[in-house]
Image (cartoon, rainbow, N blue to C red):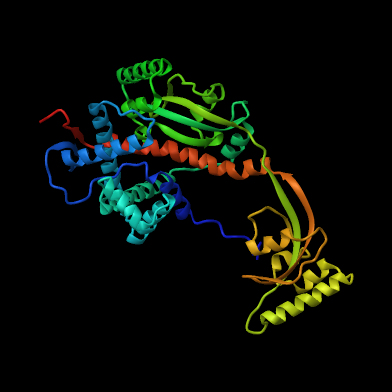
Amino acid sequence: MTRPLHRPAPHLLTTLLLLLLITALSQPLLAAEGEALDQIVAIVDEDVVTRSELDMEINKIRVQLRARGSTRLPPPEVLERQVLDRVVMKRLELAAAQRAGINVGEDVVAQAVSNIARQAGLTLSEFREALNQEGISFQAYRDGIRQQIIIQRLLQKEVTQRIRVTDQEVKSFLARKTDGGSGRSEYHLRHILIATPEGASPEELNRAREKAQRLVQELRNGLDFATAAVAESDSQQALSGGDLGWRHTDQLPTLFIDQVANMEKGGISEPIRSSSGYNIIKIEDFKGGERHIIDQTRVRHILVKTNEVTSDEDARTRLEQLRQRIQGGDSFADLARSNSEDTASAIKGGDLGWVTPGDLLPRFEEEMNGLAIGEVSEPFRTEFGWHIMQVLERRAHDSTEQVRKAEARDKIRKRKFEEESELYLRRLRDEAYIEKKLDSG
C-alpha cells in the first residue's frame, strides 16, 4: 500500500458545499411557497413571477444592500429590473434542474443552515430569531438554501461534463507568465458585464459597446462602481456590487490577465469584449507574488499492526526491542525491510521520503516534529497500528514550481467552469420564452 499515513482528500461535495456556504448570506432567496397569486410581472416559459414575489425579493435585496453600508441603493425602477432579472434566471435554473432530476435531501439543507448559523456566531435558535426580525421566515430561508444547492449541482452536472483539460493546456499554462510580468499573485476585482445575446447582430453589439464605453467614462469621473454594477450589470454578481472577491492570477478569465497586469489600484479597464458581452473591471487591491517555502522532513518508520493475534502490548514490546537493537548499532533500514508491515515503505527501508506539513496523520506529525535529526522515537500508536520512527533530514524547501504544476490543471478547470457556466446560463435565457410585464397594470 502507498503512504498509508496520508489523510484522504476532502470529498468534492464537501468542498463545493463550503464554497457555496461562503456566499449564501449574500444571495437573494425566492419567496416561500403558498403565497397568494396576484399581478403577474413576468412569464417564464410555463411559469409566472408575481408582484408579491418580486416585492419580497426587492425587500430582501434592500436589507442586504443597506447591511453592507457602502453601497447606495439604485433608483427603485432600476432595482426592480435587476431583481426581476435575478428571479427569472433562478426560475430557469430550477426548471432545468428539475428536468435533470436533481434533488437535495433535508439532511443536506439542515447541515448547510447549521453551518451558516455557526459562521455567523449564532446558535440555530438565535439564527432563526435573527431571520424573523428581518421579516424572513425560517422555512423560506431553508427553501432558498435548498435552491442554491440545487443550482450549484445543476452547474456541476451540466457544465463540468463539457470541460476537458489537456496535457498541452497544462504545459502552455505553465510556460507563459500568467501575471503579465507584474509579479502580482492575487487581485481583488469588481466586474460589470453588459451582456449580448448569442449570435448578436452588429446593431446589438454596437449598442452594448457604446453603453460599456459610457459607463467607463462615468466610472472614471467618480460614479461608484458598486452602485453602477447593481444598476447596470448583467453579471451574476451584480447585486453584490460586482464584487468578485480575491482571486489568484491563475483563476482570472484569460481576457482579464493582460489588462489587470498594467492597472493600478482603483483603475477602471476599457470595455473588454468576450463571448458573453462587454466587461468592465476595477482593481480594488492586489498582492505581490509570494514564494512557496515549506518546512519538509525526511523520515522513516517501522509499523506493526494489531489484530486478533497481535495485541497492543505485543506490538509495543516488539517495537521497543527493535528500537534497542537500532540504538545498539543495527541498521534501521534493514530492520524496517524485515519487520515493518507498511509494505510500500518497507522495501525502501521504511523511508517515507520528504513530507510536508499536513501530509501525514496529526499524531504521527506530532511525534516527528518532536524528534532531533537521527533520533529514534519511542513506540507510539496511530489508527494504523504502532510505530517507531527516525528523522533523517529537515529542509526549507522552495516548492513554488511544484505547487504551480500541481495546481495548474485544477486552475484551468476552474477557469473553464466559470466561462462555461456563463455561457450555459446565457443559453438557458436565450432559449426560454420570457415576457416581462413591469410596465403593465
**Up-down relation of residue 275 to residue 109 (above or below):** above
Q: Is residue 350 left or right of residue 150?
A: right
Instruction: Point out the residue furthest to the left here.
Output: 441
Q: Quadrant of residue 118?
A: bottom left
| Image x and y of residue 143, in percent | 28, 52
**Up-down relation of residue 58 to residue 283 (above or below):** below
- Towards the viewer: 63 or 423: 63
**Up-down relation of residue 323 to residue 6 (above or below):** below
Please give the name of the residue rendered at 29% of the width and 36% of the height, measured from the top-left corner. Answer: 62
| Image x and y of residue 136, in percent | 26, 47
Instruction: Point out the residue furthest to the right here.
Output: 329
Q: Quadrant of the C terminus?
A: top left
**Up-down relation of residue 435 to residue 223 (above or below):** below
Q: Is residue 403 left or right of residue 227?
A: right
| Image x and y of residue 288, in percent | 61, 31
Residue 200 seen in render:
yes
Residue 50 seen in render:
no
Q: Quadrant of the N terminus?
A: bottom right
Please give the name of the residue rendered at 76% of the width and 56% of the height, measured from the top-left corner. Answer: 298
Q: Quadrant of residue 196?
A: top left
| Image x and y of residue 43, in percent | 18, 38
Count of number-bearing discs: 0
- Towards the viewer: 284 or 124: 124
- Towards the viewer: 57 or 157: 57
- Towards the viewer: 81 or 115: 115
Please give the name of the residue rendered at 53% of the width and 32% of the height, measured from the top-left corner. Answer: 187
